[in-house]
Amino acid sequence: MLDSLRPIIESLIFVADEPLSIKQLEAVLGGVSRQQVKDILQQLMAEYETEKRGFVLREVAGGYQFRTRPEYRDWVIKLKQSSPAKLSRAALETLAIIAYKQPVLRTDVEHLRGVDSGGIFKTLLERDLIRVMGRKDLPGRPMLYGTTRRFLEVFGLKDLSSLPTLEEMEQLEESWPSVSRSS
């Protein structure tokens, strides 16, 4: 029975617009256990990795999604005739603060950055990378911000625990070539 489910699960993931969770797959398949779905997904992931196909199956944003292999990125961009939407350095910095400190107030982010971030917050909200998570019990009831599922998808993260630690970031920075920071 598991062999007949493999192509069905592949098809479902292939046509989905966003990562499919195990719960969603269980609901569509009906009568299939969570463990069976997990086993098939693990088999598929290993198969795509071993066969070095042009795409892989990854666990991102709480679900599973086909992704093109990073080494073929330039070819995919060439086909699509566009470059991926880029975020400014300031937007990436703001997004990183939100990701690591969430839920966080805009004023706290601005305090850390030392500049007004209203325009950047607007951009990140429009791109569905951040969301309002609620309001803090302070005068004026300021909004609390956090990242979205789309954020996880864009950055290929399984969940927030997949973010690199400060130690990992320092190791990465040490391995980068020196860049002059003067303007």
Image (cartoon, helix red, strand yellow):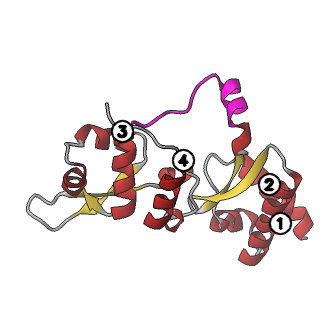
- Identify the mark at residue 10; answer none if there is no mark: 2
Mark 3 vs mark 4, CA separation in Å: 27 Å
Proximity of marks 3 and 4: CB atoms separated by less than 8 Å: no
Q: Is residue 153 something that shows in the picture?
A: yes
Mark 4 vs mark 2, CA separation in Å: 21 Å
The local secondary structure at tag 3 comes to loop
The local secondary structure at tag 4 comes to helix
The local secondary structure at tag 2 comes to helix
| Residue type of the residue flagged with mark 4 | Val
| Residue type of the residue flagged with mark 3 | Arg
- Closer to the chain start, of discs 3 and 1, is 1
| Residue type of the residue flagged with mark 1 | Gln
Closest to the observer, 98 or 145: 98
Q: Give the residues drawn in magenta, as a range.
A: 73-88
Q: Identify the residue at horizontal 68%, vertical 36% (top origin).
A: 73
> Of circles 2 and 1, which is in front?
1
Proximity of marks 2 and 1: CB atoms separated by less than 8 Å: no
- Closer to the chain start, of discs 4 and 2, is 2
Proximity of marks 2 and 3: CB atoms separated by less than 8 Å: no
Q: Identify the residue at horizontal 70%, vertical 63% (top origin).
A: 25
Instruction: Tell me the residue that label 3 is attached to.
Output: 181
In this rendering, position of residue 151 left or right of residue 60: left
Instruction: Tell me the residue that label 4 is attached to.
Output: 154
Q: Position of residue 172 (x, y in %)?
A: 52, 55
Mark 2 vs mark 3, CA separation in Å: 47 Å
Q: Position of residue 22 (x, y in %)?
A: 67, 67
